[in-house]
Structure formats: structure tokens, C-alpha cells
Image: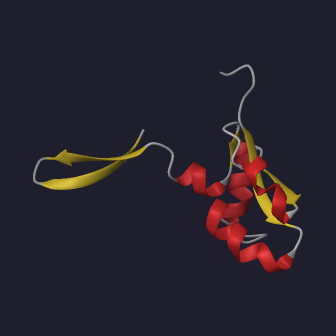
Amino acid sequence: MQRHGLEVVLPVCKDRRYSLLFAAMFGALPAGSEVADIYEKALGGKRKEYMPLDYTQIFNERNLFPLRATRHKLETRRNSYSWDSHLF
């Protein structure tokens, strides 16, 4: 357990013109979907709106967003005759 744990956020851009860019940089979960509900409830995630120029704040190492959460320590190792992906 960490003293100051990660902040789990679902970043949303206030300007709709940049919504696709935000989805590509941080990942996106459809509002009201089962996956979004699990992400929000299990990890304590919150949807936060950001101005387009504030995107650098989201890359803070203390923030966990969908794209960062899904690639967290995904490593490929040789397992017998095939390559397998493992989540550690």
C-alpha cells in the first residue's frame, strides 16, 4: 500500500474538437459501458475534464489513465515453443 497512491482518471477534453486526440493519447472507455463501470468502481476512477493545453498534467507519473493501465508492465517472454504475453 502506498502512502500517496495513484489517481485514477478518465480524461475528457472540454473542447470536442480534441476528443479523438485525447482518446488516442490516454485511451477512452464508452460512458455507461460495463468496462467503464468496472474501471471507475474497482479502481476509484473519476472522469475529469481538461482544457486542450492542459494535457501535459495528465502525463504526471501519479496519474493512471486507461491507456497506461492496460499496458502496465506487459512483457513478452519465451515460453517453450511460443512467445506469450504476461501481465506482472
* Colouring scheme, one of rainbow, by chain, secondary structure, one colour: secondary structure
Quadrant in the picture for residue 55: bottom right
**Badge count:** 0
State the residue in front, 79 or 53: 53
Residue 69's x, y, as percent? 59, 49
User: Which quadrant of the figure contains the N terminus?
Assistant: top right
Residue 63's x, y, as percent? 71, 42
Judge from the rendering whether residue 85 lies leftward or rightward of residue 21; answer left or right: left
State the residue in front, 14 or 65: 14
Judge from the rendering whether residue 57 lies leftward or rightward of residue 66; answer left or right: right
* Extreme residue in the front direction: 53
* Extreme residue in the bottom direction: 17
Residue at 88% in and 62% down: 51
State the residue in front, 23 or 32: 23
Residue 23's x, y, as percent? 68, 69
Residue 68's x, y, as percent? 59, 51
Residue at 78% in and 74% down: 18
Residue at 42% in and 38% down: 88
